[in-house]
Amino acid sequence: MSYKTPGVYVEEISLLPPSVAQVETAIPAFIGYTEKAEDLNGKSLFRIPTRVKSLLEYETFFGASHMQSLLVTLADEAPFAPQSVSFNGSESPYRIYQSLQLYFANGGGPCFIISTGGFTESPGPSLNNVDDYDELKAGLDAARKIDEITLLLFPEADRLNANQFYDLYKDVLSQCADLKDRFGLFDILPTDTDGQSFRDNIGVNNLSYGAAYYPYLNTKIVHPHSTETVTFEHGASNAFDDKTWAALMVVSTALSHQAQVVSAKTQADAAVVAAATLTKEGKLVQYKIALGAAEKALKNAEDANALVVDETFDSTELTTAKNELDAVKAQNISSSSTNPEIDTAIVDLATSSATSETAITGILAQINTDQGIAASHNTTISTYFTNSFVADI
């Protein structure tokens, strides 16, 4: 305070500490491979550092995790209980999504994502081609332009071959030393059980700008998978061997629809028999039962048809069943209808249900073909591919 005139001045001294604006102390950049890389307008975010604040925001721009192929070994005897789960081939090399799951689960804040490519590698445990190093190096170069970044991470770097692995981390140390505003966090190669190989090969320059962590930790983050990437194996015949979870699920669903159609047809046939000896009032009750059964049969046949993959497949029986049902509905059966009209309508509804049953038989055969599962497996699938079986996987 400056004083311009004589006098007495009172100054209050605050006993409270000065407030400090809360700022992020570390902004990591995750550099690696993503399912996609595009903004809300479809513009590419490839090699463009993009700030995200949550896993949901990451998924919006960069997609989901790479799906791991798994092999489930089942018992050879019914009910074919799952025995073990293993990688079907090799472990997926793509791990940036899981890294972010852990980061945000542990309270991580804003970070940058730099996508260096998509999930285009052939199946295998490594990213060991020259272009893989070049892609990750290009991601590192893109990070140089962002002053906000303070930590550099490469979740998939340990899948490079050894020479490329150490070259990439030396590049990281060089950038950190040059800019003096960031730090590298490194993994070691899976075969380096005590970290000595890392010490011997990382060089001697700029080591204060990075840190390597080992051993690897086990977490509860599972390898993401889908029903399409899970395959079963066992020694039983006409069962689940060499079939995917997705294919079995489609056939199982179709078989469930078929069972509903058969049940509906049985209801319609019973209505025909019951109506024959009833008065008009009773016949109208049986008409409603038969109508509901025919509608149920057609709906399940249509739902099964929606599972067909072959776009050239056409179920003429399904079209016929629908026309038969529509024709009965158009008669507007009511208490003013005669007994013979009601009886005929009930028979026609039973006919429509029977046509739906014929339709779904052909539809199921096509679904078996689409999914590569012989019809001889259907009984086993109906019996043992149950909710409890799936829950045990």
Image: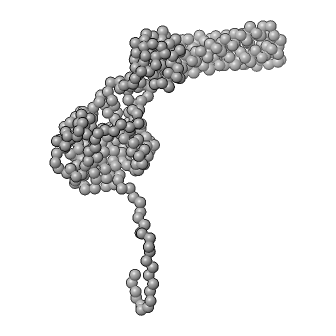
Q: What is the x, y in percent for residue 224?
A: 41, 32
Specify whether 192 is left or right of 55: left
The image shows residue 38 at horizontal and vertical percentages of 40, 41
Q: How many marks?
A: 0
94 vs 180: above or below? above
| Image quadrant containing the N terminus | bottom left
The residue lying toward the viewer, choosing from 392 and 225, is 392
Q: Please name whichever residue, 233 or 172, is drawn nearer the observer in this view of the structure.
A: 233
- Residue 279 percent across, percent down from the top left: 83, 11
Residue 274 rendering spot, x and y as whole percentages = 76, 9
Residue placed most toward the observer, 16 or 33:
16
Q: Quadrant of residue 292?
A: top right
Q: Residue, x 25% and y 40% (percent of image)?
A: 188
Residue 43 visible at all: no
Q: Residue furthest bottom?
A: 6
Residue at x 34%, y 33% (from the top left corner): 119
At a point 54% along the width and 11% down the height, the residue shown is 362
Taking the spot 43% from the left edge, 11% from the top edge, the residue there is 236
Q: Nearer the viewer, residue 158 or 355?
A: 158
Q: Residue furthest front?
A: 194
- Choose top left, top right, bottom left or bottom right for residue 201: top left
Q: Locate residue 305: give its quadrant.
A: top right
Look at the image and tell me whether residue 276 can be seen. Answer: yes
